[in-house]
Image (cartoon, rainbow, N blue to C red):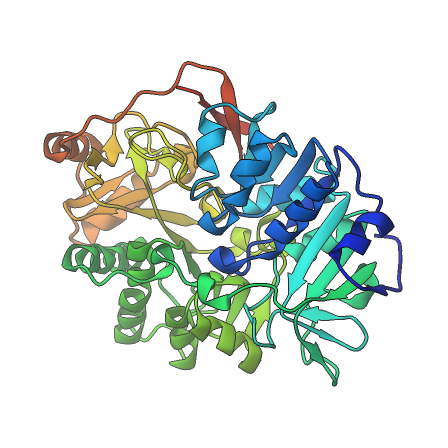
Amino acid sequence: MTCHTYKWLQNLQESFDTCDINDGAVLSFHHHLRNGDIIMKKVLDIASQRNLKGLGIAISSIFPIHAPMEKYIQTELISKIWTGYIKGPVSVPLMSQTLPYPVTIQSHGGRARAIEARNLKIDVAFVAAPCADQQGNLTGALGPSACGPLGYPMVDAKYATHCVGLVDHISNTPLPMVEIPHTQLDYLIKVDSIGDPKGIVSGTTRASQHPDDLKIAQMVSEVVLASGLMKDGFSFQTGAGGISLASVSAIGQKMRAHDVKGSFISGGICQSHVDLVKAGLFDKIYDVQCFDHGAVASFARDRWHHAMSARQYASPLCSNNIVDQLDVTILGATQIDADFNVNVTTAGDGQIIGGPGGHPDTSEGAKLTIITTKLTGGGFAKIVDNVHTITTEGKHVDVLVCEEGIAVNPANSELLERLQTHGLKPLDIHQLINKAQKQAPHQNVPKGEGPVIATIENRHGDCVDVIRAT
């Protein structure tokens, strides 16, 4: 981004000419509206009308609403993808090796690092924003499509060769908060809609109320207390899984009972996180994206609710990144194995159903990483000898909590001793693996042996695993 003034464009078509978008261009998008986004489809439709080929798509996450990508992969409009998460029909052509290049699946921190280091060079960043002011500053806090802080495109806008903002609401007064300043915009386009904010909330961003999950959440709070980290100044983050989110209220109850005042919560933020600050249990929130509308409203309203970029959140190039300041992170798992490696990318049948997001970032950064899951799911064992795909390396995982009990990574003998002293009775993870295998009616499929269709990178850009065609 070298331009310090922006220009209004009439429509998206015009942006292709002004930004000189040709075959092989790399275009970036964000996922703050999650399954409500419509901007990427509009851009790809225009690219198709112009008969472009070989585009690179750098999108922070892919959801079912991005299904049109499937068609454009088949027509060779798209040849390369960088993303942190894939859910929905787009995974189908990827698994069948339709793309000429493997998908690069990056953590959120890894994506930010790659963009800043120019390992991922973005030609044009298309930034859908719920609100702009007359100066051209952008925020996700206001407007009919409000989605919360624009943490991911804050990085794209800064480092892309061209940045195109798309807004469906313009404020007549200066914005009270700005995630992307007008100095990082080249062009701005007024559109009828950037998408449906109802799509922000999904099944994985709702706290579970299932009795087994609430039991796990209660055990998680006991583990945190026993670890010695639940003390004044305590900080934590939860993943987007239903059990992890159920742990939020359990931790709040434990803090209240022991008169603990925390410092900050980070994330992906939900109403349940906001409630802990409003209850006086924490001072502030650092928010890279909102997972529900309660969090969106809080970001617009509460001065202690701060936006952070993906760089500030988890990039190793940011010396004071937030994940490295975490005491505890509580995350989910599709699978976890005997070496405490965690898979949140592929299912028991080997299909792509997710991705790292911030999972390996927070696991590496936090003092204590707790994984929550069930013995089985979808008919498959979730606690296994070897995960299908390594998303987060076991060396960054400290403890597993499931409905049958707790297992501590043998590498953390100090934690094991603390839990035992507290009266908890951790199990050997192999006991849980055996129980899971006995309960599961289906066998997990082995790794594919075909060509590599995707690489999994940690936040440093190292490849921790690959996914192969079956």
Q: Is residue 316 visible?
A: no
Residue 360: image location, x then y, percent = 47, 42
- Residue 319 vs residue 287: left or right? right
**Could you say which is closer to the camera, residue 413 or residue 436?**
436
Q: Residue at x 31, y 36 (%)?
A: 335
- Residue 80 vs residue 348: left or right? right
- Residue 83 vs residue 246: left or right? right
- Residue 379 vs residue 85: left or right? left
Residue 225: image location, x then y, percent = 29, 60
Task: State which quarter of the image contains the C terminus.
Answer: top left
Of all residues shown, which one is farthest toward the front?
A: 49
Q: Is residue 153 visible?
A: yes
**Residue 162 drawn above or below residue 441:** below
**Could you say which is closer to the camera, residue 312 or residue 156?**
156
Q: Residue at x 41, y 35 (%)?
A: 352
**Could you say which is closer to the camera, residue 123 or residue 399?**
123
Q: Residue at x 53, y 55 (%)?
A: 325
Q: Quadrant of residue 336?
A: top left
**Residue 304 drawn above or below residue 127:** below
